[in-house]
Amino acid sequence: MADLRATIAGITSPNPFWLASAPPTDKEYNIVRAFKAGWGGVVWKTLGEDPPVVNVSSRYGALLDSNRALIGFNNIELITDRPLEVNLREIAAVKKAWPDRAVVVSLMAVMTEAAWAGLARRIEPTGADGLELNFGCPHGMCERGMGSAIGQVPEMVEQVTRWVKNATRLPVIVKLTPNITNVLWSAEAAKRGGADAVSLINTINSIASVDLDAMAPTPTVGGKGTHGGYCGPAVKPIALNMVAEIVRNPDTRGLPISGIGGIGTWRDAAEFLALGCGSVQVCTAAMTHGFRIVEDMIDGLSAWMDEKGYRTLADFQGRAVPNVVNWNDLNMNFVTKAKIDKDLCIDCGRCHIACEDTSHQAIRIIPAEGKRLFEVVDEECVGCNLCAHVCPVPDCITMHEQETGRPYLTWPEHPQNPARVLPPKAAE
């Protein structure tokens, strides 16, 4: 059976599945229940200086599909609203009772060394395994000069990271905001400041929807609404890209990463691990399905690893990274064509409509015995794979590589490129 033990920045856990800093990690009661369900670690909901914050009601907005499945989740809840001493006492109790689990504590303070260093020093005696600096919260706290207000300024990221590193012996993970033009700026700053790891992404600044009766954003608070932090399945592609940017960047390559953003299944987790993450953090999936969802994640990841012959996480961690390239490095001579399995086809016509109206008119209709058959016109098919995505039947439309006999050719070398750059041998 696969060994799921994970290590990141010297922090170990029996599996890579951690609960992210959020409502599910707000108190000892929740975290004990999570550990009993099988979670390998938690990041305690962000602590701040007393007095505690005051939250509003309601706090969540959501984007649902036509079957009311959650696509995206919007949150305007702030950091912990419980007294600091209560949180510190409970952190110590949890770590003592669950020594094998990772207990990382998120923290946030105003932009002074005394505030950040003082908070870090108060957390260290709890026995926590590490700290996560919350530079990502895009609502409420940023309006007070914290959260993403710090995370969007690389100089501040570097400075605060250095303050905390000088104040504690604990590993320091810097949680990055996606609400920035280039995530590498803050990732590089965190590394310069001495960060032991980074975690990403925090939530994306958003308005989930507008209540057309109240004429206000949701969630609506007394007839008014505000922007909040967007998370859930919809943000996973953004998170994967930002993780890939950091692992490919020469100045941040090798910096340990805890992946966050839309992780709801073992497969989601495996994708983050394949891009080099050492652990993954989950929030929305736990909030919508409960803590026991981790059982499916553990079983699924373990079974997949056994099937692939991966004994440990390290066996496939980062293996996708060499295959993440810039667009200019793709093979312009690679050709793929769509193929429709007529036995699986249900005659819905969605592939034809999509291709006919918006793409390349490469799917023709063939009348046949009271039903329609759909056929790909190879000469017109450009391999865009839109038809495969809109088809409601799994594997009914598949893409097939075509043998061209032509060599790997990138755009910089392509004859139609007006700024063509020939390989050294060809140029001689």
Image (cartoon, rainbow, N blue to C red):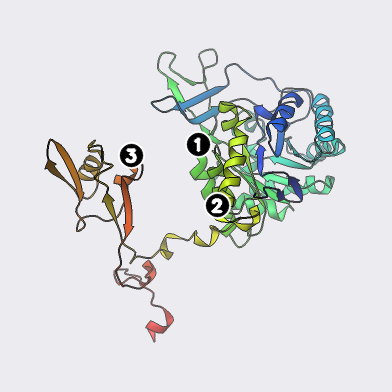
Residue indicated by mark 2: 307
In primary-sequence order, the first of circles 3 and 2 is: 2
Point 59% across, 39% down: residue: 297
Looking at the rendered structure, the kind of residue marked 3 is Val
Q: Is residue 209 above or below residue 96?
A: above
Q: Position of residue 137 (x, y in %)?
A: 62, 34
Q: Which marked residue is nearer to the observer: mark 3 or mark 2?
A: 2
Residue indicated by mark 3: 393
**Residues under labels 2 and 1: Cα distance?**
26 Å
Asked which secondary structure carries label 2, the reply is helix
Asked which secondary structure carries label 1, the reply is helix
**Residues under labels 3 and 2: Cα distance?**
25 Å
Looking at the rendered structure, the kind of residue marked 2 is Glu
Judged left or right of residue 373, residue 220 is: right
Point 71% across, 50% down: residue: 8
In primary-sequence order, the first of circles 2 and 1 is: 1
Residue 305 disc label: none
Looking at the rendered structure, the kind of residue marked 1 is Pro
Dot 3: few (<14), some (14–19), or many (≥20) neighbours within 10 Å? few
Q: Which marked residue is nearer to the observer: mark 1 or mark 3?
A: 3
Q: Position of residue 225 (x, y in %)?
A: 52, 20
> Quadrant of residue 64 in the image?
top left
Residue 233 disc label: 1
Quarter the C terminus occupies: bottom left
Q: How many marks overall?
A: 3
Q: Is residue 45 visible?
A: no
Judged left or right of residue 27, residue 217 is: left
> Quadrant of residue 387 in the image?
top left
Query: 107 or 268: nearer the eye?
Result: 268
Q: Is residue 315 above or below residue 420?
A: above
**Residues under labels 1 and 3: Cα distance?**
21 Å
In primary-sequence order, the first of circles 1 and 3 is: 1
